[in-house]
Image (tube, helix red, strand yellow):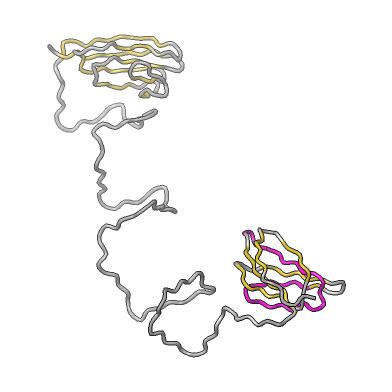
Amino acid sequence: MYQTQKIIEVQLQAGEKIISAVSQYLLIRDCSHTVTLLAKTQNRELGTELKKNDVVPLSGFATIELYNHHSTAVTLKYQLTDIPVNTQSDAVAISGAVEVHSIREPVTIDAIQQTVPVSFSAPVSIDNWPAVQPVSGKITVGNLPEVQAVRGEMAITNLPAVQAVNGQVTVGNLPQVQQVSGQVAVARSDALASAVIPLEQAMTTQLLAADSQRQSVLVQTDKALFIGGEGVDNQTGIYIAAGESMTLDTAAAVYGYALEGATVRTLAEVRHG
């Protein structure tokens, strides 16, 4: 028989168990979480959940199992002894009011077992907060609807004059005839040069050469078209839908690309000398 065995410290992984011979008493000296005790004989079986400072009499049992029934590891310190040993419970019951005058050392609360109601007899105000709060790290805001309601004016600043666009830009729902309010200035030109350019399927073709005298060019297509600089394709070009047109204010060379081929008409306005 055991007398007083030294304290044994083990770490049980999730679902792991240890089997041990027994003495008269099992003492749980320390435990990071609860464990399950399974004690068996030929005639009876004992199963219970143990925590820190629990003492279990084991008279009549031949072996015991200590089992981690949690999904995380548990660190366990236990002792088997034939001598009754009293342990002091972590819980302290206080039946009367307690007045605390001072705390000499910091107190850390790891967990609160039950909900603690908090109430105030008067409103609580927090003053002297700066208008802008410094934030370190990331802030995640969730549960926002896809469409946000905005009241009043919304100002968006710090945008560059020219925006870089990656991919296709589609402008739809424009009426064929646009209403113009106010004056419209039309620059003088020497001539309007038109051309019809057939585009082969999925092949980049030059629509207009560079011309420093050109003020603008109207591009119209009978099939889906992508326009841009040299080497343009359906990934980098500006998209013009079939039967639509677009005016470009550029003197640079203009290229076109059509996945299914297209017939493109151009009308260039040449600047007056």
For this orientation, the residue located farthest to the bottom is 96
Q: Residue furthest right?
A: 42
The x and y percentages for residue 178 are 26, 29
Q: As drawn, is 132 to the left or to the right of 232?
A: left
Q: Residue 154 in the image: x percent, y percent?
A: 26, 48
- In the image, residue 259 above or below residue 156: above
Asked whether 109 or 8 is in front, the reply is 8
Vertical comparison of 272 with 38: above or below:
above
Quadrant of the frame with the C terminus: top left
- The residue lying toward the viewer, choosing from 67 and 62, is 62
Image-quadrant location for residue 220? top left
Picture quarter containing residue 186? top left
**Quarter placement of the N terminus:** bottom right
Give whichever of 234, 187 is nearer the camera: 234
Residue 3 placed where, x, y %? Answer: 75, 77
Name the residue at 20% across, 30% down: 180
Question: Could you tell me which residue is drawn at 17 percent across and 14 percent down?
Answer: 271
> x and y percent of residue 184 in the render?
16, 26
State which quadrant residue 208 falls in: top left
Total of numbered circles in the picture? Answer: 0
Left or right: 114 in relation to 54: left
Question: Residue placed at 43% from the left, 13% from the top?
Answer: 203
Residue 240 in sight here: no
Residue stretch in magenta: 46-72
